Amino acid sequence: MKTEKEILNKKNILSGMQPTGRLHLGHYLGVLTNYAKLQNEYNCYFMAADLHAMTAFYSDYEKAQEFLIPMISDWLAAGIDPEKAVIFVQSDVSEHSELALILSMYTPVSWLMRNPTYKDKQINIDKEIDSHGFLGYPVLQAADILLYDAEFVPIGEDQLPHLDLSRDIVNRFNHFNKHNQNNVFRLPKPLLSSFPKVLGTDGRKMSKSYNNTLILSSDEDSLMKEIMTMKTDTARVRLKDPGNPQNCPVFTYYDFFAKERKDEIADNCMKGSIGCKDCKNIVGSKIVVDLEPFRERYKEAKDNSQNINEILKEGAIKAKEKARETMQKVKDSMGFYLK
Ligand code: TRP
Ligand code: SF4
């Protein structure tokens, strides 16, 4: 049975996020608001990538599972709507593992060794992750995308090498297997979000691994406290020193939360007539107030985990339906003996 969106010929989108920590402002401005928009225009599959999370959490996997309900609560709070999008957990749809195994036969090891995220993480992560599964991470990601015949994949730039690999795998698979003389898989395309990088409290890109995040679901006081400790223009030492807002991470938040005061603040900062504390207070209170409805929805969602379980169950049923269809096509094209 086709969904309403499929009947309307909407294109499919798949995106995934690993449940490996609490979501922060960077996720919100860069990813979640984008998901919430996309669900109105596309047939969206949004997936909690809990199998991918196993690469780093293999020894304490229950921790990754603990992040699952909070992450879905964040999604719901950001307006992702189970009536519009299919929200599901990767491990609930066993076809992900099955297709990943098949695709792995079409993926030369040298392609995976060249993958920049593989090289990076091996150097940077304190935990030992030199597993077969970690090397094959992009193969599982390709399976995620291909199972849903996704035309677009909304991702950040850091994920582009993974998508390129998916495309290489598609080409290789399609080269060897045809389904009624047609290609089995379509080539997925990236959908880069137009949001700029969100900076963290230390001025570097906001990221869990830098410990510089503003957690979306934190209460007002903790949020405000984090903002007050933020780095500013480091060249500005005394209140009367002229500052340079272009070198200040706090100032970047004005763009998102208090655009109407940007010019005035920049002016005063450069003249040395506003102190950083006041400046943080202004934008900080705006952030806290703007996120208040989010916090309320988050709390409501998280306190009602039975409802989330229902959403995920429903989502898994819908996802599985599509995934099974694809697997049938894959096996057919390869010449599996079908009973
Ligand atoms: N690798 C992605 C990340 O860490 C998560 C992910 C898993 C994903 N499967 C995906 C993203 C499929 C897009 C499409 O952010
Ligand atoms: Fe940054 Fe504001 Fe301080 Fe200027 S006044 S350096 S913009 S925090």
Image (cartoon, rainbow, N blue to C red):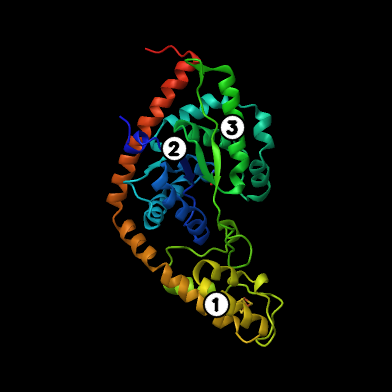
Q: Are marks 1 and 3 in contact (CB under 8 Å)?
A: no
- Give the label, 1 or 2, closer to the camera: 2
Residue 35 in the image, given as x and y percentages of width and height: 45, 50
Q: Which residue is mark 2?
A: 12
Q: Amino acid at mark 1?
A: Lys
Q: Is residue 292 left or right of residue 167?
A: left
Q: CA distance from mark 2 to mark 3?
A: 16 Å
Q: Nearer the viewer, residue 269 or 287?
A: 269
Q: Amino acid at mark 3?
A: Arg
- Lower position in the chain sequence, tag 1 or tag 3: 3
Q: Residues within 10 Å of mark 2 (few under 14, many from 20)?
A: many
Q: Amino acid at mark 2?
A: Asn
Q: Residues within 10 Å of mark 3 (few under 14, many from 20)?
A: some
- Give the label, 2 or 3, closer to the camera: 2
Residue 67: tell me if it is visible: no
Q: Which residue is mark 1?
A: 280
Is the residue marked 2 within 8 Å of ligand 1, measured from its CB? Answer: no
Q: Is residue 110 left or right of residue 24?
A: right
- Lower position in the chain sequence, tag 2 or tag 3: 2
Residue 188: tell me if it is visible: yes
Q: Which residue is mark 3?
A: 167
Residue 209 is marked as: none
- Secondary structure state at the residue bearing disc 2: strand
Q: Nearer the viewer, residue 89 or 256?
A: 256
Q: CA distance from mark 1 to mark 2?
A: 41 Å
**Which quadrant would the C terminus be assigned to in this image?**
top left
Is the residue marked 1 within 8 Å of ligand 2, measured from its CB? Answer: yes
